Amino acid sequence: MSATSHQKRRRVLAAAAGLTTVGALVAAMPAGAHDRGNGHGHDHGYGYGRTVDVQLLSFNDLHGNLQPPAGSAGRVTHTNEDGTTRTIDAGGAEYLATHLREARKGNRYSITAAAGDMVGASPMLSGLFHDEPTIEALNKLKLDVTSVGNHEFDEGAKELARLQYGGCHPVEGCYEKKANGKPKKFRGADFPYLAANVTNEKSGRPVLDPYFVWEKNGVRIGFIGVTLEGTPDIVSAEGIKGLKFGDEIETINKYTKVLERKGVKSIVALLHEGGAPASASYNYNCDSPGPGDGISGPIVDIAKKVSPQVDALVTGHTHQAYACSIPDPSGKPRTVTSAASFGKLYTDTTLTYDRRTRDIVRTSVASANHVVTRDVPKAADMTRLIDRWNTLAAPIANKPVGYISADIENPADAPERPAGNLIADAQLEGMAPADKGGAQLALMNPGGIRAGLVHKASGSEGDGVVTYGEAFTVQPFTNMMTAVDLTGAQLITVLQQQVSGPNQAAPKILQVSKGFTYTLDMTKTGADRIVTGSVKLNGEAIDPAKTYRVAMNEFLAGGGDGFAVLKEHKNKLVGASDLDLLNAYFAAHSSQAAPLAPPATGRITVVK
């Protein structure tokens, strides 16, 4: 079945459902509707030997980064043979397209798959247009299939259905016009989004296809796509009402049996959950000294329990780079990969398919991550796509909103980040006036800060100028701000929840506004890492019995990121959006003559 046939079939189903609800959409669509792949014309001849090598190219967590990500967000670390390291500038759809197309050459059987978060938390070029540019780019990249990630649900399940099946935005309409002046309708994704473990609470059926079978010249490989079970904890509750997120292992094993009954024995799981290798280098050997010894995190336990019939796991979510072998339940090594984030890497995996057994020869599976370097020719079709959407975005994106004297970094591995301090200060200032909420401090979730600010000009605006587009890239969710009542005891519990419960294995350290200070003792474990006597506001110890007004975004106020105690807040007042407050702070505190300096750190004292 061709890609065009796939699109026509999905369009008929979408029309029948009326796109009123995802549940209605599912009711109109049989499970496993995408039972045949298109091959995307990668065949360069026919071979019918006993075995055939199938190339699996994969990536994850693109997050709409069509243009090369700036600063540290656009670099990967390489470890040299002598143990020294160097960084390489990487990423950008123009380069990713060139690398993937070059990698496919000479491979008669080539599949391109992804493990979620293709969209969401995107830079302005894509985010301003509800990620239509990224879906269009992925179509041009000939992506065959992807799982959903948590960020695919940022704007709710109905918006995800629109990205899959097409149609113009229900509020903003069509962004472009045809030559005849009529609206140009968004066509949707040519590839299937898989959501095996995301079901309608009432019907129990997946909201999108649970699996996809790629087929070419008799070679059949099944893909099962799932997102992390904890998605409801990290997305807005409003957008996923009526949906249930199931156990990843149970779901993959369930659909593995479904595929086996259909005669599909070669299976790959696309899983938006991941791990943390012991090294930040993309070329780190996480199988040294033993299979999977150099990686930790949720993916390890999952990989050890997923059915041995699954031949490989393509993973994501943690934005880390790894190509490991983790033993399956039978003790046999199985490849588990992740290609960092933002299109900086892609993974090339060789799956040797046995035509007689219709299965993958697991001992022959080999994987490696490759850098999407920027020293190759740009793909002309991607350049045209980026230029087209940039033209539409330019009047808004290029508007200066502030000035900075140096880079304001957002280092993912630091408990306290200069960009986080800036945002928390902006939120406090915006919500502090009595008529705006009377906030005394602000808390910001680290995952909501998507980039730092780079002093060097990204275009013609000049060094040190912060444009609306750059500010949008830092704060792309447009979360509404709130001011709420919390007791001192609840505030201390919030800090403890950063490093305990669901956040114990991977702490989520909130960014705090100026004047709020405490000590984080990493030599201890769990909630004990917070030195309760050190928690102070403007030098005065927090009183557990006293009530404080705290600014935070709606996501946190709803208990997002595992901060359950925040749902116990009282007297909520809703203010402006986080982006509006950031831009207002720039307007009040920076000018071309007096640019804003990076905020000092030291609000959180870390004991190691």
Image (cartoon, helix red, strand yellow):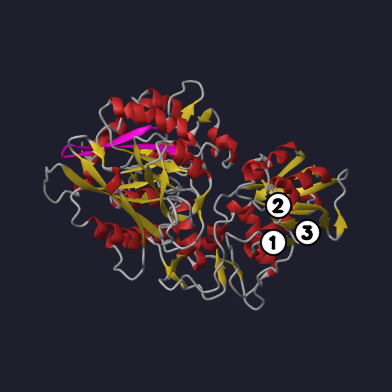
- Which comes before the other along the chain, label 1 or label 3? 3
Q: CA distance from mark 2 to mark 1?
A: 23 Å
Above-or-below relation of 574 to 157: below
| In the foreground, 445 or 348 | 348
The stretch in magenta equals 207-226
Left or right: residue 288 versus residue 591 is left
Using the image, tell me which numbered label, if any, was put on residue 517: 3
The amino acid type, in three-letter code, at marker 3 is Thr
Left or right: residue 372 versus residue 41 is right
- Which comes before the other along the chain, label 2 or label 1? 2
Query: Where in the figure is residue 106, as x and y percent of width and height?
Result: 18, 56
Toward which corner of the image does residue 563 lie, by quadrant? top right
Residue contact at pointers 1 and 3, CB within 8 angstroms: no
Residue assigned mark 1: 608
Q: Residues within 10 Å of mark 3 (few under 14, many from 20)?
A: many
Q: Quadrant of the C terminus?
A: bottom right
The answer, for residue 18, to whether it is visible in the render is: no
Toward which corner of the image does residue 105 lie, by quadrant? bottom left
Q: Quadrant of the N terminus?
A: top left
Residue assigned mark 2: 443
**Magenta region includes residue 414:** no
The answer, for residue 370, to whether it is visible in the render is: yes
Q: CA distance from mark 2 to mark 3?
A: 12 Å
Residue reaching furthest bottom? 593
